[in-house]
Image (cartoon, rainbow, N blue to C red):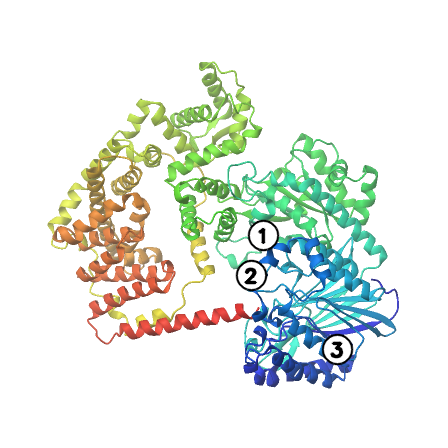
Amino acid sequence: MLIGERDFMLRIAHLSDFHLAANHISDFQEFTLKALIKDLLEFHKEKKIDLILFSGDLIDKGGMSFNKDIELAFMSFNEYVIEPIQKALSIDKDKFLFVPGNHDIDQSAIDEIYEDGLRHRLNSVESVNNFIERNSTSGLERILAFKNFERDHFSGYSHQITNFSSNFKFEINNLQIGVACLNSSWRCCDNNDKERLLIGERQLINARKELGECDIKIAVVHHPLDWLATFDKRSVEQIITKDYDMLFCGHVHEGDTVTKTSMLGSLFISTTPSNWTSNLRSTDRNYSNGYNIIDYANSEIISYNRRYNHAQERFDPNTDLGDKEGKAIFLIPNNGELERRNFEKKTCETIKQVHYGSRDEHLLSFKTDTLAPKNIEELFVLPHIVGNEQYDADNQDKEQIYDLERLCELSGHSIFIGNKESGKTILLDRLMIEFSNNIDKYRKIPVYIDLEDSRTSKIFTDISRFLNVGIHDIDSLLTNYQIVLLIDNLTPSYNRSFKIKEIEQITQKYSNVQVFATCISLLDGELPIELLEFEILPKFRALKIAPFKTKQIKALTQKWFSKNQNYQKKELLDDLIKIFGKLNIPRTPLAVSMFLWIIEYQESYKPVNNATMLENFVERLFRKHSSKEIYSEEFDFTNKQRLLADIALHMYNNDLENYKIPSNVLYNHIYEYLKARKFLFRVDDVLKEFIEVGVLTEEHGESELFVRFRFSCFFKYFLMKNMDYRVEFKDFVLHEDNYLKFEDEIEYFTGLKRDQAGVLQVIVERMNKKFEQLVEYFKSIPSGFDVAFQTNESIINQLDNNYLKRLTNSDKPTEEELDQISDQALENQKDELGIEKKYDLSKPQELERSWTLAAKVLKNTEETEDGALKSKSFNDLLTCSSAFATLYKIFLNKHFEKEDGKNDDDLDVMYKVLPLAHQVITYSLVGTAKLSVVMKEDIQNKLIDNPNDYTEFEKYLSVFIYSDLKGPEYFKYIAQLIKDTKQSYINDMILFKLVTYYYFRSKNQSMDLQYLNLIGDLIIKVRNDPKIKKSKIFEDYRLKRAKKLRSSNSEDEAI
């Protein structure tokens, strides 16, 4: 409540979570208590501390360290905490108030059967109220030891102590101060308490009766309110906000202070850190020990945030939560301000009720057959937003990256610039929700206006309708309140230009109005030229919506499958990165969502191949827009697909740059196509839909408008469909003179059919023919394919004896470091500048494409019954690819000889690890579990049955392509390869693969040890060095792992 203009100050020391334990008392006294009393005294001398509020967890684990004697533990808390502080500050005993925490309950007093019954019965406000009104100790046995300690502490004082709330009234500076010490721990049971705890409405109502008309009311509770069960949180939060001026809590071991204002009132909340002795030496600033001093004056609340500095053995200002003095100031609103805030809150409640539901309709998941969330707050992932002038793809440290909170706190006007489907509309939706949900934090009322969909002629009218405020009140609203206009599709047109002018006028007249706008840009992050004619727009802060990075893809994937646990997060993320790399589609929220939607319904959440993914993607693009289609039933997806295939062939035959075609020529072509089939559909409608869906795009030439396929993969996909529709085109594509120019089209075709054994046979035969002389040459020399890779400088021989030990002691990459690696793979994807023309290939290019195409077709031809064809094709593929890699290495040798040491860094790396790089590339082309039997048979042939017929390079490829798939018994085959290998360069490549597996694949101790054992066997074999003690290293590793696990569990147990 408000206390008027009286000059008044109440000083409170807020402590929490000491977790007093018998084995830590010495450290507690020497470090925590000594420093705390010294710091408290400095504040106390400046201005008397009136109250000490301790928000729970007085002791640790119910007094387990005190020989399981909880009463002794509480007595020790009184002896080692309360009495020393009370004596030092000369403060009355009843001015040290405390509440029970989850560590203050007696776990041994919990009856599991009775507990299960209570958990199921106490499921509503009414049932909890009835339980509290019974005033029985049944079910409260766990809290009775604490309550006995509390009653003993306050004996001799006339305060109200109950098994639930304990209520206190003090007269301080001629004002009545009421404190309700609330019990949130009476339902504590185990480590799964969050969102299951109860305070109970009746506990608060009883406190209200006792505290009556106190001038200032304070609530103290251990748990933050979001730990309560949903039904209890709703009613408890309302009553506390309405009845109390301040709320003090702990439990989370982190500090925070905030003021929340609603129609019910204004509430200051102090969450103080712990002073847990086990945390004394922690370097984690978020969980460092500390406490708060709170000054309550007539117009403001000042929080002095303190943090323990163990090096100096003192408490210092916590500058993370305040200024250089650790001070944070919160204003206490007057009646006029409360009226303003009530209006803001009421207006935002209207926004929630009227507009939230329609915002969810913008999600791809909303009207689709997916189990993904259909609510923006649950599914939204903020795109990668950077300040346009700061964006530097080569130096990302300079990027000025914005999160949601930072966007909401911006002043001035901003415009989000992105391409089609970059997520700009849903971004504005999310900003609207963020502003509305946190009106007491940002104090900005949002208004969403879509210029593309607006049916009014005035922005004033749009504001009036959105907020449900009379048109004559808009001037007053814009004058007196902070309004954020969220303007979607700020692209000039005849109708929109008038509204853009009106937005200019509004921003010039009303200083309280802020604008967030969106626009589509054809150039990367550049404001469209046509917007520059408006005086205000060049002054907008330009914010680029950049493509999703690994962090955003991962976050969206986790949210999409939040209700589906049957997916492998890491593998799915890898699949998505491969898909975007192959198809070269921008990583927009829509594109990622589309692929997640497709993958969700693939077998075991595993993409089949690029062609099926692309087909599904295109089909779902049309399905997403089906509500806007004019002919969705009559002119269905099959009709559209055939027309687009015809358009692709027409563009190919015209052979212009980017396979584009003049708009009028395309119009006439579609007209003739529809006319020949006696379709009555309007060409304008059909062409408009193809462009709006995003399959086709318009491109302005010097004097005319062109149309082309938006992405190269779309053009190749629809061109490929002609192989189905036109026999003569299929024959043309597969002709020996042409087929290598149509690598992607043949991959898509065989990927969709999956049974084209005849195509596979032809492609493999042609590959063998092209490589015939090269293979014969290499097989005629003693070392075969190994000849170009042989080396006298073995990497393994250069390792010292401690390498294996250092490997076990080194930390594996963090999740953030793994994301950076994935980001690098995504950034290596070149932006598509157009559709590449079909060109004649050089001889080396023909060799490369012949074996890579054979690999893709083999991978796709999974449904053929000719198993022998698969096996022969795989064997021939490895032979030809080995020949190509060997030839490439010879070219590199000649290149470096010619350059005389002036090496290109990338080529230098490739030169040194070419066998490894070639194996990874081959796996990426042919790796599929559906070929695992073929691969296993190939390993049997090369390693066991006919080892003398194959080079070590071929064996290395065979074993590790299979191992990358995690095929059955792959450890056995790696061990056999290690045993048989004589080539130094292969030993080095095996080491690289095993170390990579250890760092990036292994997820548990058992697998770690398998990889380490193989690495150890490899090093011992190569170096023939018995000094390397594998067993001792592995035992040290086990001890290190056990120690790390114990360390990581200790903090969890304390909360």
Residue 79 lies left or right of residue 708; in this view the side is right
> x and y percent of residue 710 in the render?
47, 35
Q: In this view, does 366 lie above or below 1049?
A: above
**Residue 160, label in figure:** none
Q: Is mark 2 on a helix, strand or loop?
A: helix
Q: Is mark 1 on a helix, strand or loop?
A: helix
- For badge 1, the amino acid type reads Glu
Q: Quadrant of residue 925?
A: top left
List the residue tagged with mark 2: 113
> From the viewer's perspective, is 487 left or right of 926?
right
Nearest the viewer among 241 and 631 is 241
Q: In x, y percent, where is residue 679?
A: 49, 16
**276 lies above or below 559:** below
Indicate which disc residue 154 carries. Answer: 3
Disc nearest the viewer among 2 and 3 = 2
Q: Distance between the residues labelled 2 and 3?
A: 34 Å
Please state the horizontal and vertical placement of residue 496, each as a whole percent of the image: 68, 33
Alpha carbon separation for disc pair 1 and 2: 64 Å
What residue sits 75% from the left and 37% below the top? 465
Amino acid at circle 2: Ile
Please indicate, yes or no, whether residue 306 appears anywhere in the rendered image.
Answer: no
Amino acid bearing label 3: Phe
Answer above or below: position of 108 versus 731.
below
